[in-house]
Image (cartoon, rainbow, N blue to C red):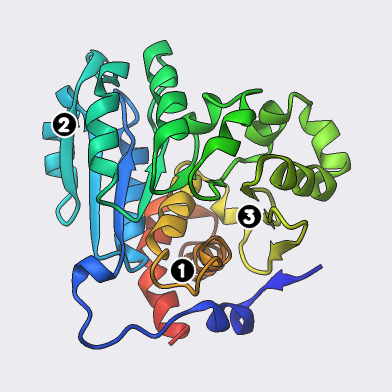
Amino acid sequence: MNLIVEDMAKKLVLERPRDYHKGQCGRIFVIAGSAGLTGAATLSAQAAMRAGAGIVTLACPQSLNNIFEIKLTEVMTVPVAEAEPGKIGRVALGDLLAREKDFDVTLLGPGLGRHEETMMLVRDFISQAESQLVIDADGLFALRQQCDLLRSCKKVPVLTPHLGEMAALMGISVEELREDIIGISCGAAKDYNAVFVVKSERTIVALPNGEYLATGVGNSGMATAGSGDVLAGTIAGVYKLAREGVFPQLGVYIHGRAGDIAFEKQGLGLIASDIVNNIGVVLKELE
């Protein structure tokens, strides 16, 4: 099994020219957040910034915009139309599609909620978006047994399911998935022309060409709320930092290594924001 460890990660990183401006360092559009789940959107957007993105913009439900204005400093916010207070509505589709064309990556799903209109919005957006997609959390819920939509993506999408989400996507049980996690993940990646980052005690990155890698970093302390949101944001954030086509692998390594550094300080008491706060430390190690 090919393990994503430091030596490999260093080979995935591009050197950033001194004369780069923020627009060249990655423009990330995050569509996330709903009532009660503003933390997931916040963590993913902050992780993208810590991972080296030059600009991060969060599209959020209109009634929650003031909350995000307080929670986020470096991240810009865009309030969009709602189906009901705190839930992005299908009516926002045109606005979101018009905006996403100006971004390199769109991260879709953290804390988005599962309102019926929101789920329809997600599916419509996936089938029409032009930017690189990273799909997580409630974005994955909208795709349950509808993964055929992924084949219409303009660029190979990246999905970041945990075991329960992956099993639901495939219409099987978690026990069945565990029996052949590599075979099922690689089969899905090939069938749907997508990258599957399957989160577990040893996260697997399955590629459409049949290849797969597994993380060589990470620890049990990372089994904490918000850790997956941080991973999705990290993967999106390193898009311009990584050599072409390898940003999911680099993001997985940085996330796991940041978790290891946090674990050294906090042990089992680490929380997701501790991982965010150590992403920059890992970037320094990879220079």
The foreground one among 133 and 130 is 130
Q: Which amino acid, by three-letter code, is at mark 1?
A: Lys
Say which label, 3 or 2, has the lower sequence index: 2
Task: List x then y, in percent, for residue 250.
Answer: 53, 68
The foreground one among 34 and 221 is 34
Residue at 47% x, 29% y: name it: 138
Alpha carbon distance from label 1 to label 3 = 14 Å
Which residue in the structure is indicated by mark 2? 79
> Which quadrant would residue 209 be assigned to in this image?
bottom right
Under circle 2, the secondary element is strand
Say which label, 1 or 2, has the lower sequence index: 2
Q: Which amino acid, by three-letter code, is at mark 3?
A: Ser
Residue at 29% x, 70% y: name it: 25
How many residues crowd mark 3 within 10 Å: few (<14), some (14–19), many (20+)?
A: few
The label shown at residue 265 is 1
Task: List x then y, in percent, for residue 233.
Answer: 40, 52
Under circle 1, the secondary element is helix
> Which quadrant would residue 245 be assigned to in this image?
bottom right
- Between tags 1 and 3, which lies in front? 3
- Lateral position of residue 262 relative to residue 246, left or right: left
- Between tags 3 and 2, which lies in front? 2
Alpha carbon distance from label 3 to label 2 = 36 Å
